[in-house]
């Protein structure tokens, strides 16, 4: 039986890692994709002194704080910005409700700039791991597999409050800016 052929549909334009959930991300030239997403992505979660998760939707200033991935430094910066004590704890690998990989096309960003933005979504900061230059619309890929660099991803759903699509990791591997995206 003949295997289906991969069809190139675009390229990786940008790669973003967000070391701390709800904080600003860092653009990187390459990243390792593990079974749980990009290495180092959303590795830390912010807790208040009441042990409840603190998110940018409740404290919008968080989204402007650059994360270093150093939990002490990041907690100190957040405490200063928020005016209350917070601490960082490792994000559990399972059950967080965070998709392993968030992909957004340049086309989705342009549609959002023209006013096609889901409720609760920021068109200016889609917080995606991968920004892609594509032929077509990534929303049509739900249920399909993508090869991005060495990684194989399965597009699982469109987010309710974000641009783009979410994907699970089927095969870990390295991805780099400029890598081909094949459907």
Image (tube, grey):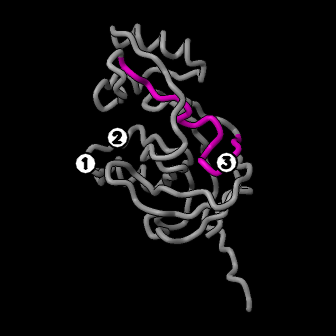
Instruction: Count every numbered label the image shows and give the total.
Output: 3
Q: CA distance from mark 3 to mark 2?
A: 25 Å
| In this picture, residue 126 sits left or right of residue 67 | left
Q: Is residue 41 magenta?
A: yes
Give the camera-side residue of 53 and 153: 53
What secondary structure predominates along the stretch shown in magenta? strand
Provide the residue span drawn in magenta: 30-48
Of the two numbered discs 1 and 3 on the same chain, state the one appearing first in sequence. Answer: 3
Q: Which mark is residue 119?
A: 1
Q: CA distance from mark 2 to mark 1?
A: 9 Å
Secondary structure under tag 3 reads strand
Residue at the extreme left = 119
Q: Quadrant of the C terminus?
A: bottom right
Of the two numbered discs 3 and 2 on the same chain, state the one appearing first in sequence. Answer: 3
Say which residue label 3 marks: 33
Q: Position of residue 2 (x, y in %)?
A: 74, 89
| In this picture, residue 182 sits left or right of residue 19 | right
């Amino acid at each position: 039986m003949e295997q289906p052929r991969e069809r190139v549909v675009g390229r990786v334009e940008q790669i973003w890692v967000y070391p701390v959930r709800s904080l600003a991300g860092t653009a990187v030239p390459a990243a390792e994709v593990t079974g749980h997403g990009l290495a180092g992505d959303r590795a830390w979660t912010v807790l208040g002194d009441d042990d409840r998760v603190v998110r940018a939707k409740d404290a919008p200033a968080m989204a402007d704080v650059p994360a270093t991935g150093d939990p002490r430094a990041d907690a100190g910066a957040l405490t200063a910005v928020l005016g209350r004590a917070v601490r960082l704890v490792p994000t559990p690998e399972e059950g967080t409700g965070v998709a392993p990989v968030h992909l957004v096309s340049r086309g989705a960003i342009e549609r959002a700039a023209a006013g096609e933005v889901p409720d609760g979504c920021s068109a200016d900061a889609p917080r995606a791991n991968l920004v892609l230059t594509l032929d077509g619309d990534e929303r049509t890929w739900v249920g399909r597999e993508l090869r991005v660099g060495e990684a194989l991803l399965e597009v699982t759903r469109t987010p309710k409050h974000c641009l783009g699509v979410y994907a699970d990791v089927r095969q870990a591997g390295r991805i780099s800016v400029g890598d081909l995206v094949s459907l």
